[in-house]
Each structure stands twice: as structure tokens, then as C-alpha cells.
Amino acid sequence: MSPSPASFEPAPNRAVRGRDDACPGALRLHRADDGALARVRVPGGLLAADQAHALADAATELGDGQLETTSRGNVQLRGLAQGCGAELAERLSAAGLLPSLSHDRVRNIVASPLAGLDGGPGLQGWLDELDTLLQRSERARALSGRFLFALDDGRGDTAGLDADLTLIARPDGGALLRPGRAAVAARVEDGPRAALRAAEAFLAVADGAWRVREADPDGSRLFAALGLTPGPLPELPGTRPAVGRHPGALVVGLRFGRAGAEQWHRLADAAHDGLRVTPWRSVVLPGVAAVAIPGLRTDPASPWEGATACTGAPGCAKSLADVRADAAAGLDATTGSGGLPVHWSGCERRCGHPSGQWVDVLATGPDTYRISQQSGSTTEVTNHQMAAAVADARRTT
Ligand code: SF4
């Protein structure tokens, strides 16, 4: 698979702009229907076991007892009580999860979750350097909370995430920098430093845009600003890690990216060498061969593999349905492996939808859904009919 961006994006989901970037953070909580929501940035998805325990404790003592992973490998706490912001910030700071008050929302960095574990290059050096450079950059404070850096170890997993700036490790030890959805990339000497310079150059041309693809669709302005000469993008395998056992690690799937605090504590207890939250609603446990935690999955042939859903009702007032309950019932009633990724949404914003090819399941009422396929065909179904129709669409799109 080439690291091309999403080719299937339902028309109503194209860039929606308000006056402000309201992306939540650890300090800037979002008021949801089920209480306040905090998004804790976890660069590269890397958590030490004690940090994971601290998040679970915060979820229990300040929130609704659930932890949510996001499509950028971050962690959200929901159902937070009004006025708990100061205590949450104190807890996160003590756990090393809030190293910068001024740059909290811009530390959006995803990294290939199996990097350095199964024979490919590690990304820790790039990750640490980029995170440090970002936090030291006064200009970077102006980046949108949606601006995303992707570090790819060459397998093409995070390179397919439609990031704003992607660094790709090359077999010769070098690095390629790809801006947004550009069809080209340029060799760079110091990848993290080049990525930061590119982010700062983007701010100079952004003119209100939040994403590189909006201000510089072919990357030419950023390449010119950095004095880089781009060349063709290499073909990359494009494999994201399925749940289950891999050389050097175990990937554990979370239902719609959610885990209860007790499940999360057990994941942290099982970790030999930290945890890696993936952008695909799973957690990597390096050096672990097996775990058995009720409600979490390690079977790659499950229909839950590749299944995601937005928050839906009752957490989001915009939702026409309790999409997670409906989707879970449908997935539990399905046999065999899933096929294409599928995403359920309670409204046309389609929060958290995947990149690349996927099946779109949109609530059109409290008991009705529209299923859209890559080919453009759509099917209107009742909730009762949905499981079979979704299974067909995942196999045939
Ligand atoms: S897609 Fe719509 S219903 Fe779902 S969380 Fe986003 S705004 Fe809410």
C-alpha cells in the first residue's frame, strides 16, 4: 500500500471550520453531555506502567471510570466533574504526562507502534527529539490541536494516517519528509528538526488553515521554504498491526478503544516494558506473549478488528442513536473475520473515522442507518437489519 491519504471521505465530512480550534486537551476540557472530557496527549502512544496506572486512577476518582484511546493514540477521560481541572493537571504533571502547560495540545505525534520490536528501526530517538523541539518552539504554540506529526519506521502504517507532516525511516538510515497529502517527499538530514522547521513554515503560510493539506496541498510551499527538492514517494507495505501476537509484542484490542479502569490496571500490570497506545484502538505490550483480560481481545479474526464508532448518544447531544450499543450488538452477532474497517457515526461529522478504505455506517434516526461503501453505493437499513448488511459491505466494498 502506498501512503496515500483517505480516498473515501463522504462529502458531508469535508473540512468543517468554526471560528476557533476547540480541540480539547488536558488543561482545556471539553464540556460534553456526560460531563467534562480531557484529552491527554501521549506522544508516540508511549506510556510507562505507572503512567497507565495514574490515568486509570484519575478515571476512577475524577471521571466515569473509563479510558478512551483516540485515532491519534492519545487517551481521553470522560464524565469528569466540574471543577476537577486543577486536580487533574496536578495528577498528570506528577505522572510526567503534562510536561508543558503552554504546548499541551500541540504534542500530537503518532509513531509506528511496533517500531524497534520486530526487526525494524526504533523511533524513540526521533520521538524524544521532536517532542523536545516542539515544546521549546514558541512558534509551535500556534499550531492547531489537530495538527499531526507521524513517525513511520518504513512499514507504512502511520504514513497512511493523513498526518500533516510525516517522517519515514529509510532502509539506509535516512529520513523522508512528506508534507500533508503531497505525492512526493524529500530526503532530510535531521528528521525531527526538519519536521519542526516545516511546521513553523506552515504557520507562516497557513492563513487560518489548521491542516497542511488545506494550505499547501502539494507541499510545494513547504519544500520551497525549507530549500528541499522532493522526489517520488516510495511504496510502503502499509500494514497496521492486527491484534494478537507479533514478534516481540502482543497487540491487545479495546472495544471501540475503551477500557474500564480495572482492565487498564491489568494491562499496566502485564506490561514488561511499558505500553504503546496505537491509533487503531489497541495497545501494544512489548515483550509480552499472552494476556487474558475479560473484555479485551487478542483474536485477529474477530469481526471487532477494524471496527470503530464515535461517542454517540448519550455522551454526545448531536447523535441520533446510541451507535456504540447498536454497533456492539451487531458485531457480537457477526461470525467470522470482519474485512474492511468500519466506522459507526451518530451524525455527519463522523468523528474519529479511519483513514484509507472503510465502510461508513451513519445513523439517520434512532433506529435506522445508512451504509455507504467505497464504490459509492448506499443502503438504508433498520437497526435490526444492520449487522448482516455491514458484514456484507465489509466483504464486498
Ligand atoms: S460524529 Fe456526531 S454524534 Fe458522533 S461524536 Fe461526533 S458530533 Fe457526536
Image: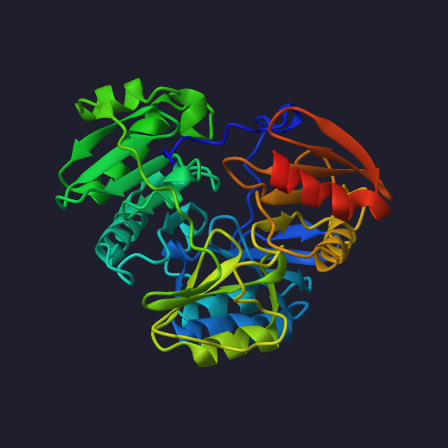
Q: How many marks?
A: 0
Left or right, 373 with respect to 212, comes to right
> Is residue 212 in view?
yes
In this picture, is 11 found above or below 42?
A: above
> Is residue 317 in view?
no
Which residue is farthest bottom? 269
Which of the image's four quarters has the C terminus?
Answer: top right
Describe the colour scheme in one phrase: rainbow
Which of the image's four quarters has the N terminus?
Answer: top left
Q: Position of residue 367 (x, y in %)?
A: 87, 44
Q: Position of residue 301 (x, y in %)?
A: 56, 58
Left or right, 217 with respect to 231, comes to right
Please tell me in which quadrant of the rendered image residue 365 appears. top right
In this picture, is 306 found above or below 78?
A: above
Q: Position of residue 289 (x, y in %)?
A: 40, 75
Please tell me in which quadrant of the rendered image residue 48 appears. bottom left
Q: Residue at x 67, y 38 (%)?
A: 393
Left or right, 300 with respect to 256, comes to left
Q: Residue at x 60, y 59 (%)?
A: 302
Q: Nearer the viewer, residue 308 or 49?
A: 308
Q: Residue at x 36, y 43 (%)?
A: 150
Q: Nearer the viewer, residue 396 or 350?
A: 396
Q: Position of residue 213 (x, y in %)?
A: 43, 25
Left or right, 141 with respect to 312, comes to left
Q: Nearer the viewer, residue 342 or 313?
A: 342
In this picture, is 164 found above or below 388?
A: above
